[in-house]
Amino acid sequence: MTTDFRPVSSSKISISELMLPSHTNFSGKIHGGYILQLLDQIAFACASKFCGNYCVTASVDTVNFLKPIEVGELVTMKASVNYVGRSSMIVGIRVEAEHIQTGVIKHCNSSYFTMVAKDKDGKSIQVPGLILTNLDEVRRFRKCIKQIETRKEIEEHAREAKVNSIEDLASLDKYNVLVEIG
């Protein structure tokens, strides 16, 4: 067990980038894939800054696209480590877009990346413990615990869910699906 603990504040990082026409999708909004790329970069920087080691993305637990981002808006991403395990960290990221002329800021995205610390040989390495210094940090930590529990329940349900009867197939009739098994 590590005796090294660091405050959430030691992980905080933010990046800002002006959204250009080259970042758009076919509808003229900023492409979600481009935002995902930036999210992965800031998650890496945040986790690596916190633990002092190289980190890899283990999973992207949640990405909620709430509002579209327009060309010419200044996008700011704010990240912090919200939870630590033995070698893993959950990084929470908030994405805001600012209309430069009006100063209006909108919350566009919230994301949670699970990052794993690695040593120079690529083996998982223990991360420092997390010091929670306010109720928001405690709330975020507890939310991550719930997120982990929910993920485990979903994985367990997926292992148990087997189609092995006519009743299983018949239960799909309330969905927008046509089953044609030959």
Image (spheres, helix red, strand yellow):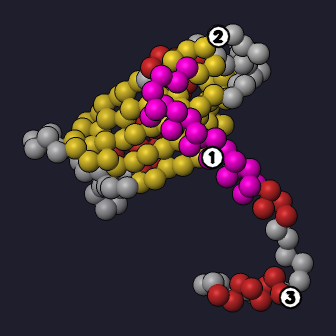
- Check the image and name the residue furthest to the top: 3
* Amino acid type, callout 1: Lys
What is the CA distance from the residue labelled 3 to the residue labelled 2?
A: 56 Å
Q: In front of the other: label 1 or label 3?
A: 1
Q: In front of the other: label 3 or label 2?
A: 2
In this orientation, which residue lies closer to the viewer: 175 or 92? 92
In this orientation, which residue lies closer to the viewer: 10 or 61? 10
**At 36% across and 41% down in the image, what residue appears?**
95
Which of the two discs, 3 and 2, labels the residue nearer the N terminus? 2
- Check the image and name the residue furthest to the front: 135
Which of the two discs, 2 and 1, labels the residue nearer the N terminus? 2
Q: Which residue is mark 1?
A: 146
Q: Is residue 52 above or below residue 157?
A: above
> For the residue labelled by badge 1, is the local secondary structure a helix, a strand or a loop?
helix
Q: Which mark is residue 4?
A: 2
Q: Is residue 132 above or below residue 72?
A: above
Q: What percent of the width, then of the height, locates residue 139?
A: 51, 38
Q: Is residue 140 magenta?
A: yes
> For the residue labelled by badge 3, is the local secondary structure a helix, a strand or a loop?
helix
Q: What percent of the width, then of the height, locates residue 127?
A: 66, 19
- Magenta residues: mostly which secondary structure? helix
* Amino acid type, callout 3: Ile
Q: Is residue 136 magenta?
A: yes
Q: Which residue is mark 3?
A: 166
Asked if the residue at tag 2 contacts the one at tag 3, i.e. Cβ–Cβ closer than 8 Å, the answer is no
- What is the magenta range? 131-155
Decide: few, some or many residues near mark 2? Use Cα within 10 Å; few <14, some 14-19, many ≥20: few
Asked if the residue at tag 3 contacts the one at tag 1, i.e. Cβ–Cβ closer than 8 Å, the answer is no
Q: Which mark is residue 136?
A: none
**Is residue 5 left or right of 167 when viewed as pictured?**
left
